[in-house]
Amino acid sequence: MHIAVVGLSHRTAPVEIRERLSIPEQTMEASLQKLRSDEQVLEASILSTCNRLEIYTLLRHPDQGLSAVGQFLSQHSGLAVAELTPHLFTYHHQEAVAHLMRVAAGLDSLVLGEGQILSQVKKMVRLGQEHRSVGPILNRLLNQAVSTGKRVRTETNLGTGAVSISSAAVELAQLKVGQARGLDDLVPLDQEQVAVVGAGRMARLLLQHLQAKGCRGVVLLNRTVSRAEALAADFPALPVQCRPLDDFDHCLSTCSLVFTSTASEDPIITAERLSALNRRSSLMLVDIGVPRNISADVVHLPGVQAYNVDDLQEVVARNQEARREMAAEAEGLLEEESRLFLEWWDGLEAVPVVNRLRRQLEDIREQELQKALSRMGPDLSARERKVVEALSKGIINKILHTPVTNLRAPQPRPQRHVAIRVLEQLFELTELHPDE
């Protein structure tokens, strides 16, 4: 068996590629079933966010298994494998484990140390369990990654003042508004007419940061107005007007700054839509959705500025150096957690030979027990038979305890290999059982 992760992220692929590979929750079950339908993929789990798509797998054979994953990605995206390959990364075993730990801790995020990725990893675990695509190996690995992410946030300074994609989007708007005024710095958003489209977690964070950056009011649009109103109620100090999406065109005509964060798989703002409006002279659009909520053609319209998640690098770079120092605290913790999982994994190597030894000793126990019982004659009571059988089982368990414990204990792999070979030779355990 072989652990591997195949994926792409903001580091390896532009947003137009990432959105082709995005897998929404409503199609996750079908995607996991498709992956697991290949005999080479023993276990699978998918992490799909605005900045990454990663497929964690337990493979029967690495080359054939990775080929199956590549074919899945090609079919899902409609892109040829040759088109996808330059954007993909692949990590095996130890590197795959270390990568997952870094992802869960926020060390591989666009915004270093952002906390939302941990909830996304938790969601990956939940979906893998619900759809029965993970087994004992990935289940242990993924849950350990979640525990690692929690440890990093509670035991290091990386979680202190951690920023998010949403806060970076607000800072980007501040920077661009400032540049429009001839300033090379972040400015308050108190003069902007602001709209936010969507009422999910990203929208909540947008409202939180808009309030902190001096915004005087927000129009919050959502398909379900009651959900927008429930979100607005959590921000009593920020004037929020909740409106249905039917009022979207009016907002595009009157607002100067619009943030979009919806689960729509198609753009909700296009050049055609904007051209049909009698809008104000300047409009800034900030899109943090993947797939994108705003089509690329809007930038050709006069007075329109449009930015997506890939444009956040400009503001992220301003804060990255200080956060790298905080991230250094977490590296030792991540190494420890990776080592613990790999020691557990290495211990599994001893399981087949231990099972063969146990079966061999059990066969001997059964044979000798029957001989002993036959010598004792028919006068032996049922209770006495049970006592004798329990005695024989207890002896076997005592004999096995020390070698099994030592074989599965943390130790260098070469040392374990030697111990396994010696045990196989001493007890002639080289023949595989049909069930193994």
Image (cartoon, helix red, strand yellow):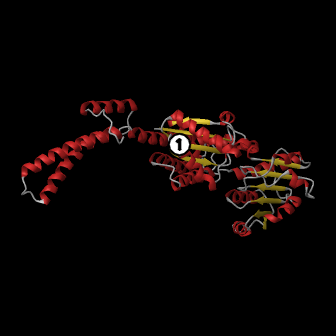
Q: Nearer the viewer, residue 31 or 139?
A: 31
How crowded is the residue under tag 1: few (<14 C-alpha within 10 Å), some, or many (20+)? some
Viewer-side residue, 214 vs 56? 56
Left of 166 or right of it: where is 140? left
Q: Quadrant of the C terminus?
A: top left
**In the figure, is residue 218 to the left or right of 83?**
right
Residue shown at 52% from the left, 56% from the top: 130
Q: Amino acid at mark 1?
A: Asp
Using the rendered image of the protein, determine whether residue 230 is visible from the camera's viewpoint: yes
Place of residue 290 in the rendered image (x, y in percent of width and height, measured from the top left): 71, 49
Splitting the image into 4 quarters, where does residue 188 fall?
A: bottom right
In the depicted structure, whether residue 350 falls above or below residue 232: above
Look at the numbered disc 1 and give the secondary structure of its residue: loop
- At x 71% / y 70%, what residue is drawn? 226
Q: Which residue is mark 1?
A: 38
Q: Say whether residue 332 is visible.
A: no
Residue 90: x percent and y percent? 58, 35
**Closest to the observer, 178 or 206:** 206
Q: Which residue is pictured at 59% across the width and 49% down the height?
A: 31
**Residue 129 percent across, percent down from the top left:** 51, 54
Q: Looking at the picture, how far across and down is residue 359, in whole percent? A: 27, 42
Q: Which quadrant holds the N terminus?
A: top left
